[in-house]
Image (cartoon, rainbow, N blue to C red):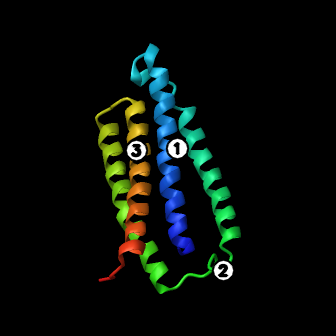
Amino acid sequence: MPFEEKSAWIMGGLAVVSYAVYLAIVLGLSGSMPLTEVPYTGPLPWTVGGSIVASILLHIVVRAFSADDAGRKDQRDREIYRFGEYVGQSFLVIGGVSALVMAMAEVEHFWIANAIYLSFFLSAILGSVAKIIAYRRGFQPW
């Protein structure tokens, strides 16, 4: 398995775990108060930051155990990476436009922040899945 495919697995897995932890915390706190009053400003940066730190550490570990191909990228790796990033970016655009519309409609900050976080999550998942499928089933650039 190429290092870049391992990286896609790491990023996709961490996105799922960190978003699930965030949802568990926020929904757990919402039992005694309305959802829009839950203190999301603490868990959100901690789960994002934890995911970043975990990603760095996991990449270091995987790079150490796959020293043969860790630093090598060929043309196919670069094209798959670019393809996955382009596919994933679509959700960032959707999330940005959604947040803009919600801000103009004066929706509560809770919903705007969570729409943006959801778009980052979906972008990471979609980009990782696109890369993994391209590695597993083949990639035909057009």
Left-right relation of 142 to 44: left
Compared to residue 137, the image places residue 56 above or below, namely above
Q: Position of residue 92 (x, y in %)?
A: 38, 55
Separation (CA) of disc 2 from disc 1: 30 Å
Q: Residue furthest top?
A: 32
**Which residue is located at x 39 percent, y 62 percent?**
129
Residue 127 image-quadrant placement: bottom left
Of the residues shown, which amino acid type is indicated by label 2?
Asp
> Mark 1 highlights which residue?
18
Separation (CA) of disc 3 from disc 1: 11 Å
Residue 118's mark? Answer: 3
> Mark 2 highlights which residue?
68
Considering the numbered disc 1 on the image, is that residue within a helix, a strand or a loop? Answer: helix
Considering the numbered disc 2 on the image, is that residue within a helix, a strand or a loop? Answer: loop
Tag 3–tag 2 contact (CB < 8 Å):
no
From the image, state whether disc 3 or disc 1 is nearer to you: 1
Of the residues shown, which amino acid type is indicated by label 3?
Leu
Separation (CA) of disc 3 from disc 2: 36 Å
Q: Earlier in the sequence, mark 3 or mark 1?
A: 1
Of the residues shown, which amino acid type is indicated by label 1?
Ser
**Which residue is located at x 50 percent, y 53 percent?**
13
- Other-residue count near label 1 (Cα within 10 Å), few / some / many at <14 / 14–19 / ≥20: many
**Which residue is located at x 68 percent, y 76 percent?**
67
Left-right relation of 109 to 10: left
Residue 70's mark? Answer: none
